[in-house]
Image (spheres, grey):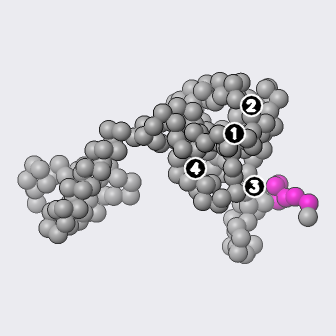
Amino acid sequence: MSFSPLISELINSLKCLPGVGAKSAQRMAFTLLERNRDGAMQLSAALHNAMEHVTHCEQCRTFTESKLCKICDNPLRSESGQLCIVESPQDVLAVESTSEYKGKYFVLMGHLSPIDGIGPKEIGLDKLDDLLVKASIKEVILATNPTIEGEATAHYIGQMCKAKEIAATRIAHGVPVGGELEYIDGNTLTHAFTGRRSL
């Protein structure tokens, strides 16, 4: 069955969301049209405003509506001398939710992946290099994902820090709290054994 041009456009637009296929997009479109037109208009306005006004923080590159995000604009965040490197703005939220980290961030917006044509410049390592020179950073905490690309990215940044005589540490990866060893995959156990520490 073919839909009218406007309905087809709405369905196709919804398919740009992650994990939304044709059926899900169709269901969303008809739910908005049938039952929640006010909600749809509110969603439309929020999307338009976000796309129009949300940009990247000039220092850490996370999402913000200002030149600097609230974290970078907070002078107390500079006192620790720590800089946490993450792959995405969602990772900033994850670290912040722990309430343990009090330093600043640098968001890569991805990871190194030569196969996909993503090199150091594409993830802002030239900007990170400038930041390492200008800011008084004592420790870089590498919190990239524990994937092959994430590990390669962490190693590359670690070498950048070493050249500038800045301490670089990697967040621990391994057995999750409450996890049972028999259900843990081999790679995770390898990380756990490699990253073991004294009690």
Asked if the residue under mark 1 is in contact with the one under mark 4, i.e. CB atoms within 8 Å, the reply is no
Question: Which class describes the residues within 10 Å of circle 1: few (<14), some (14-19), or many (20+)?
Answer: some
Instruction: Residue type at mark 3: give it.
Output: Ala
Q: Which of marks 3 and 2 is nearer the N terminus?
A: 2
State the separation of the CA atoms marked 3 and 2.
25 Å
The picture places residue 184, in percent across and down from the top left corner, at 70, 68
Residue designated by label 4: 92
Which mark is drawn over residue 78? 1
Q: Which of marks 4 and 1 is nearer the N terminus?
A: 1
**SS for dot 4:** helix
**SS for dot 1:** helix
Q: Which of marks 4 and 3 is nearer the N terminus?
A: 4
Quick check: is 194 in the magenta stretch? yes
Instruction: Residue type at mark 2: give it.
Output: Ser
State the separation of the CA atoms marked 4 and 3.
17 Å
Asked if the residue under mark 1 is in contact with the one under mark 2, i.e. CB atoms within 8 Å, the reply is yes
In the rendered view, would you say 23 is above or below 133?
Answer: below
Quick check: is 28 in the magenta stretch? no
Q: Which residues make up the magenta segment?
A: 193-198
Please state which of the two labelled residues, at mark 4 or mark 3, is closer to the viewer. Answer: 4
State the separation of the CA atoms marked 2 and 4.
21 Å
Instruction: Residue type at mark 4: give it.
Output: Val
Quadrant for the N terminus, please.
Answer: bottom left
Residue designated by label 3: 172
Image quarter of residue 133 = top right
